[in-house]
Image (tube, helix red, strand yellow):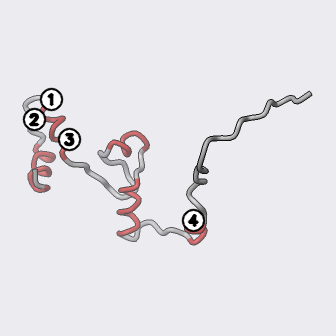
Amino acid sequence: MTLSTWLDIYHSRRWLKFNDFLIWQRSCWLVVPLQSGSCPIDIKEYSCKHSVGLAIIFNTYQVSDKTRIQPLGKRKTRGRPKKVSTALNL
């Protein structure tokens, strides 16, 4: 399905069956910069990497230098986790 066809169906809202609507909905995602969209993550968490990326591309969101320096998270170390010691050693 092309983008123009998808948008025509979106504006006309012509679905005869609910299954037709589901097929249409899952065929393409509507993403708006820094707003809610129709991708699964956006529906659940109200912001996704796609909308933030579009906002950065269109210069509506500026990433500060402090944000770029911060690490995203601690990586898991290799191997089996160490055995946890008991809280009260007597």
Q: Which residue is mark 4?
A: 67
Q: Secondary structure at mark 2?
A: loop
Q: CA distance from mark 4 to mark 3?
A: 35 Å
Q: Position of residue 41 (x, y in %)?
A: 38, 44
Q: CA distance from mark 3 to mark 2?
A: 11 Å
In the rendered structure, find residue 25 and report the number of the disc placed on it.
Answer: 3
Is disc 4 in contact with disc 1, using a CB cutoff of under 8 Å? no
Which residue is drawn at the image coordinates 32% and 55% (left, top)?
32
Choose the circle earlier in sequence order: 3 or 1. 1
Q: Position of residue 57 (x, y in %)?
A: 36, 69
Q: CA distance from mark 4 to mark 1?
A: 44 Å
Q: CA distance from mark 2 to mark 1?
A: 7 Å
Q: Position of residue 44 (x, y in %)?
A: 40, 39
Choose the circle earlier in sequence order: 4 or 3. 3
Q: Which residue is mark 2?
A: 15
Amino acid under disc 2: Trp
